[in-house]
Image (tube, helix red, strand yellow):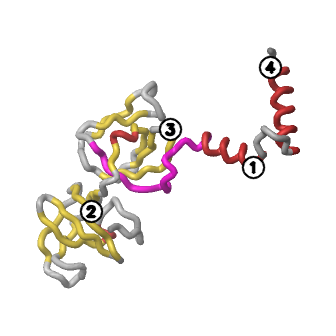
């Protein structure tokens, strides 16, 4: 069967489906199915934060193992932002703005943060006037335990406390985390 015959056959099927003959799919159902297959992602919101699952994560130029490795992350638990999806591949961006593609199995939903630019105070309670239990230097990575309002409860280098959202990268401005 040539390409023209295939096109005619497809056009006939679409016409039959449009008039609703038994055994044919309704056009709306066909549209939903096609868009679901085209999307081929997790269905989770984009953008969103995740963290690296491994000490060594290959970042590729495109969504597949046939694409060359552009660089390698060497920092387990570092936060990354997922900005796009294709099948089992996620396009990520790091705190410095570099982006590339990684396989979803190399990412974790466990939330983490990094101190991006200037030292940040880790407080005993979520208040600017609260006792400072530690000073976190740039590039310190830690675990986000929860966030409410302008504050997040975190753990870094074995010390737990509260940090203002503006002092770290890895959480959105008003995103609740429980």
Which residue is found at the position 84% from the left and 45% from the top? 20
Name the one closer to the observer, 118 or 70: 70
Q: Which one is earlier in the sequence, the residue at label 1 or at label 3?
A: 1
Identify the image quadrant of the C terminus.
bottom left
Name the one closer to the observer, 92 or 109: 109
- Which residue position is annotated with label 1? 28
Q: Residues within 10 Å of mark 4 (few under 14, many from 20)?
A: few
CA separation, marks 2 and 4? Answer: 56 Å
Percent position of residue 146, x then y: 29, 68
- Which residue position is annotated with label 2? 144
- Which residue position is annotated with label 3? 87
CA separation, marks 2 and 3? Answer: 28 Å
Q: Give the magenta part as a residue range.
A: 38-53
Answer above or below: position of 48 versus 65: below
Residue 96 in view of the camera: no
Indicate which label's residue lies in the foreground, 2 or 3: 3
Indicate which label's residue lies in the foreground, 1 or 3: 1
Answer above or below: position of 67 versus 142: above
Q: How many marks?
A: 4
Label 2 sits on a secondary structure element that is: strand
In the rendered image, residue 39 lying in the magenta stretch gets the answer yes
Q: Which one is earlier in the sequence, the residue at label 1 or at label 4?
A: 4
Q: Which one is earlier in the sequence, the residue at label 2 or at label 3?
A: 3
Indicate which label's residue lies in the foreground, 2 or 4: 4
């Amino acid at each position: 069967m040539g390409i023209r015959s295939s096109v005619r056959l497809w056009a006939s099927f679409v016409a039959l489906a449009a008039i609703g003959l038994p055994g044919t799919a309704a056009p709306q159902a066909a549209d939903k199915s096609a868009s679901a297959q085209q999307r081929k992602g997790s269905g989770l919101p984009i953008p969103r934060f995740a963290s690296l699952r491994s000490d060594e994560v290959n970042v590729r130029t495109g969504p597949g193992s046939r694409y060359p490795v552009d660089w390698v992350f060497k920092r387990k638990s570092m936060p990354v932002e997922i900005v796009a999806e294709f099948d089992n591949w996620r396009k990520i961006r790091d705190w410095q703005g570099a982006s590339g593609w990684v396989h979803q199995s190399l990412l974790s939903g466990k939330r983490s943060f990094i101190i991006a630019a200037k030292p940040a105070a880790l407080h005993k309670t979520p208040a600017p006037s609260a006792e400072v239990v530690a000073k976190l230097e740039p590039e310190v990575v830690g675990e986000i335990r929860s966030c409410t309002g302008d504050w997040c409860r975190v753990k870094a280098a074995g010390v737990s406390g509260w940090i203002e959202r503006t002092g770290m990268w890895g959480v959105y401005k008003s995103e609740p985390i429980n």
